Amino acid sequence: MRISLFSGRGTELVPGLVSAIHKQAVTVPVRCTFAGLEDDEQSDQRHHGGPDRALHYYPAAHYLWWQTWQTALGLPAPRTPWQPAAFGENLSGIGLTEAQACIGDVYRLGEALIQISQPRSPCFKLNQRFGYGQLSQVMQLNGRCGWLLRVLEEGVIAPDATMELVDRPYPELTVKRTADILFNQVRSEADLLLLLENPALSPNWRKHAADWLEHGIVADWQRRLLGPESMRLG
């Protein structure tokens, strides 16, 4: 499967809010390290980046869905066009979605070896990026979130590289199912244990599963999805 590569640096998304969501196409071979693509940046190190969130993949086919969604609701044109890199992804391609990709999947991408670690958790910066106050909530509900990956082996990736599946150790746990267990269904001890006991799932996601199991209370996603009051759109 052929992949497009994108990277970017932090810039001001709106006054007072810096983000590295603005990505540009990579046109020359780039080294992929354990921290991600060289010259790529994550502005908010608390919620982005790190060994388990080194790369972000977003299926290119979803952009047509978002365009259809916008048209069907009669919404004005988005601040950012519906096209690859708009969601701040590093990797994009056709032929793989959250319904097929699984936690723990290992892929060869150029010289690098990468592994799916968790679904993406949408945040309020997407609302600012596109100009729709509830876009992050819609994304979380419909599961078109993309996913994050860790780097198992560093190496150079060409801009026209292909991504080939090497191993799928947990075919029962797709990215879509993982996100639904935590975000979009009632509490299920069996499903939460499935997340908690999966060694390929990022520690942060396993902790969310453990907390829900222990306390019996779903996490509050409001601040992540909507942001502080001063940043919320109507």
Image (tube, rainbow, N blue to C red):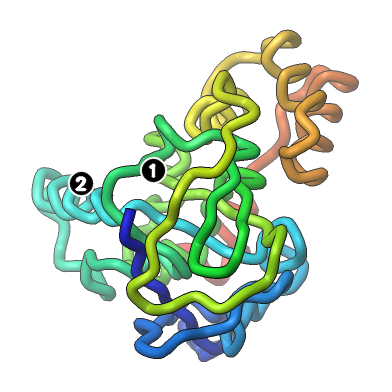
Q: Residue at x 49, y 75 (%)?
A: 157
Nearer to the camera, 22 or 234: 22
What percent of the width, then of the height, locates residue 133? 39, 57
The answer to whether the residues at label 1 and label 2 have Cβ atoms under 8 Å apart is yes
Q: Which residue is mark 1?
A: 144
- Neighbours of disc 1 within 10 Å: few (<14), some (14-19), many (20+): many
In the drawing, does residue 7 fall left or right of residue 152? left
- Neighbours of disc 2 within 10 Å: few (<14), some (14-19), many (20+): few
Which quarter of the rendering shows the C terminus?
A: bottom left
Q: Residue at x 85, y 29 (%)?
A: 211
In the drawing, does residue 50 fall left or right of residue 143? right
What percent of the width, then of the height, locates residue 110? 49, 68
What percent of the width, then of the height, locates residue 138? 38, 43
| Tag 1: amino acid | Arg
Kindly report the distance in space between the C-alpha atoms of the residues bearing marks 1 and 2: 9 Å
Q: Which residue is mark 2?
A: 65
For residue 41, say whether it is visible: yes
Q: Secondary structure at mark 2?
A: helix
Answer above or below: position of 50 versus 102: below
